[in-house]
Amino acid sequence: MQQANLQQMDTADADRPESEARLITRTRAGDMAAFEALYRRHCGRIYAVCLRLSGNPALAEECVQDTFVTAWQKLAGFRGDSAFSTWLHRIAVNTVLGRHRSRMRQANWFVDAESEQIEAVPAVETDEATLRDLEEAIAELPDGARQVFVLFDVEGHTHDEIAELTGLAVGTCKAQLHRARKLLRGRMQA
Amino acid sequence: MSTRNENPQDRNWQAAMRKLPRERDPGRDLWPGIAARIARDQSPGNRTALLQRGLRYALAASLVLGLGLVIGLQLQQQGAGPQSGPVTAQTDLASDPAVKRSARRGHLIRAVAADNTRLQPATREQMQKELAEINSAIGVLHQALARDPDNAALRDLLYQAYRDESRVLAAIQRLETRYPTHTTL
């Protein structure tokens, strides 16, 4: 009986996930196993962000790898002012946008619509098939429109935050959001 | 300041967007690629010339250790018995990183620099040369870290340099304790 209890306790200890703070501390000391544990915890979330922002699975994989390599290099500078997931998310967003900036042409981003109002859109059904179609439609958006759309409507950033992340003017962000919603609406109604 | 849209229809739209899965499976394990890149980025070959120097010093220290072992084996075959050397130190310098800054470390380094050891002259000269190179690397790495204090690769190299120094000092101590001055190369 006692042995069974001990075994149960051992199993419970083994199953208990190590705290993120401890994993971060171990990683800072150069422990790759701890960093791998952090990767396993966050890779799904980071991949989702990279995939939606880039619209390209192969590019998203590269960005995930870049994100974690950058995180490894900069972890000493992580002060814990925000959650690790938030810090990692920001690295991921900057990674995707940085890659985009390096190859973008200004013409692709420029939308002469500072005065455009963001158009209200009809309610969206949220059944599984519709969400799948929506994912595909998001992936097909033009780069600039997709990135602003994902950051605003999916990730919940404000226009000010998006402007800071992308280097665009707030008005341009709004215009890109309008453009993305318009394109998505057309696609979903087709 | 414009932030989020408060239009009810937009809120409905945004609520729908947030029903998209927060996580996606990459479809393959990306960790091996990440681990390989971290290892590669940390290797001196892909860093600065400074880091290349760090690797060379580590290699040099390893060679010194190898040389020490060969000398030791040869002398052991010649039947040399263990004796007490003029310089004593902790038994295993490499096992305790804190010893790198200890008085014992300074004492050993000064002893080697002042030729106050029982090492054979050629061996002592080689050890002095290797210690000087490692010490130079430590200085360069400290300077680099002063400019880039968050650089984990530099910190790792600095730690390795101290470890190398400790190993060389331990090898010196071991050699002179076991095989005093009368030994030959």
Image: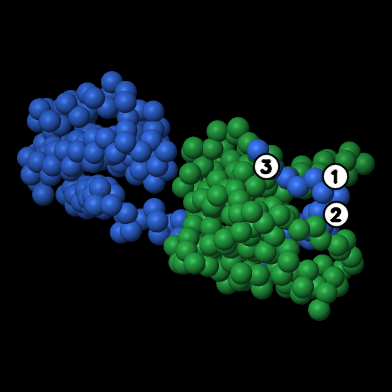
Chain colours: A green, B blue
Q: Which residue is mark 2?
A: B9
Q: Chain of mark 3?
A: B
Is A29 left, or right, of A185 in this rendering?
left
Estimate the spatial distance between the alpha carbons at disc 1 and disc 3, rounded to whole Å.
55 Å
Q: Residues within 10 Å of mark 2 (few under 14, many from 20)?
A: some
Q: Residues within 10 Å of mark 3 (few under 14, many from 20)?
A: few
Estimate the spatial distance between the alpha carbons at disc 2 and disc 1, rounded to whole Å.
52 Å
Can residue A147 be seen here? The reply is no
Of the two numbered discs 2 and 3 on the same chain, state the one appearing first in sequence. 3
Q: Residue A155 in the image: x percent, y percent?
A: 70, 52
Residues A179 and A22: in front is A179
Q: Do tags 1 and 3 sit on the same chain? A: no
Residue A136 vs A16, above or below: the answer is below
Estimate the spatial distance between the alpha carbons at disc 2 and disc 3, rounded to whole Å.
18 Å
For badge 3, the amino acid type reads Ser
Q: Chain of mark 2?
A: B
Q: Which residue is mark 1?
A: A8
Q: Residue A185 in the image: x percent, y percent?
A: 78, 69
Q: Which residue is mark 3?
A: B2
Question: Which residue shows up at 71% across the image and 54% down it?
Answer: A117
**Residue at the extreme right of the image, as rendered:** A1
The answer to which image quadrant residue B164 occupies is: top left
- Secondary structure under tag 1 reads helix
Q: Are marks 1 and 3 in contact (CB under 8 Å)?
A: no
Q: Do tags 2 and 1 sit on the same chain? A: no
